[in-house]
Every structure is written in C-alpha cells, then in structure tokens.
Amino acid sequence: MISKIPRFLQQLFKKNVEFRQNTKEKVIFLTFDDGPVPEVTNKVLEILKRYNAKATFFCVGDNIRKYPECYQSLLDQGHSVGNHTMYHSNGLRSTFDNYKTSVDEFETLCKTNLFRPPYGRITKEQLRYVKSKGYRIILWTVISFDYNKKYSPTRCLRNSLKLKAGDIILFHDNPKAERNMLFCLKNVLSYYSEKGFRFERIV
Ligand SMILES: [Zn+2]
C-alpha cells in the first residue's frame, strides 16, 4: 500500500481536490477523521495543547450529536472542523439521494466549508454536488494507517515521518486507531517541532 499520494495523481485531481496546502513555510496540517469520541478525542486535544498545535477534525455528524461537549471543546480550543458526512457514508455504496442527505444533515449541526469524503470515495455526481455547495474537498498527502490493526505503532510512524512543508497527514480519533494514532501523533509533534515546523489548522 502507498502511504504518500504520488505527485502525478495529485496533479490529476488538483482542480477538484486538495492533497496539500500551498505554502513554503514549515507548516504541517494534522487532520483527524471520524470523531469526536470523548475517550480518544480528549486525549488528542491534550497532546495538541502541549505543542500549541492546531488541527482539523473531519467529524462524523452522528458523533457531534452524541458528544456535543467534546465537539464544543474542539471549537473552544481553536481547531477547524470539516464535514465528514452525517453517517460516514461511503460514496460508492450510497445512492445520490442518500449521500446528499448525509452531507446536508451534517450542516444542521455544523457550518463549515471543508469536506472530506469518507474512505476518500466519492462519485463524480456527488463531488459536483458537494462543490456546488461551496465546499473545498480536502484529502491528504500522507496516511498514517493508524486504523490498521495489523500495523504496529512504529510501522505507522515510519509512514508518518515522510512529511514536508504544506503536507496534510491523516489520523483517526476513534477507538480502533487509538493506540497507533497516539503513538504516532506524539512522535510526529516532537520530531517536527524540533525541526522548526508549526502545526496549523486548515482554514
Ligand atoms: Zn472517515
């Protein structure tokens, strides 16, 4: 499996999708998908605070509804939130109408102009719809594979130490990924801080 999206592929989709942020500054964009889940997200928030790091959380609407206080903590601590649909809908397995509902229902809980399709999967029609609503589609440059139970924390970290200025890294703030994610996150923060990088949210 590839952990870094090849540049030619990035070029191909550049018009519709963002794989990285355009900057020459030493900035890395941490992103967390599938939360908020208090038992994990609160730990992430504590760690980020220690490094004065800001991040972007692509939340599942249903989790915002279940855990409104945890969601509020994200906002209070100055992080960005993106739409990851209401029910973590897989674009390729959803009808257009179901997908549309999942995107729209999220908006009753949170207003944002950032969108990340669950699993990175979306049809042309769905993409067109999401774009027509004014969303920027944010994917990632580097995937940590934190959710993969077969990967050890150190293997995930190897994937995570390939970051360059402007890159976006994908983590998951959910119980399945917790062990690998927390290990990687702490190490990414300390490694890149020492190299003079900052961690910013996508706005
Ligand atoms: Zn997801």
Image (cartoon, rainbow, N blue to C red):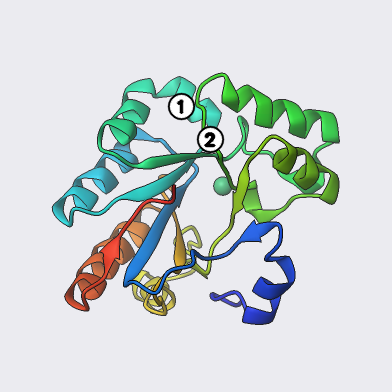
- Residue displayed at 41% across by 48% down: 56
Q: Amino acid at mark 2?
A: Val
Q: Amino acid at mark 1?
A: Ile
Is 6 positioned to the left or the right of 163 in the image?
right
With respect to residue 147, does 43 lie above or below? Answer: above
Residue at mark 2: C-beta within 8 A of ligand 1 = yes
- For numbered disc 2, what is the local secondary structure? loop
Is 169 positioned to the left or the right of 87 in the image?
left
Residue placed under numbered mark 2 in the picture: 60
- Residue displayed at 42% across by 69% down: 23
Extreme-left residue of the structure = 50
Indicate the position of residue 47 as horizontal and vertical percent values.
Answer: 21, 52
Is label 1 in contact with label 2 (beta carbons under 8 Å)?
Answer: yes
With respect to residue 89, does 86 lie above or below? Answer: above
Other-residue count near label 1 (Cα within 10 Å), few / some / many at <14 / 14–19 / ≥20 = many
Q: Which mark is residue 19?
A: none
Compute the Cα span from label 1 to label 2: 7 Å
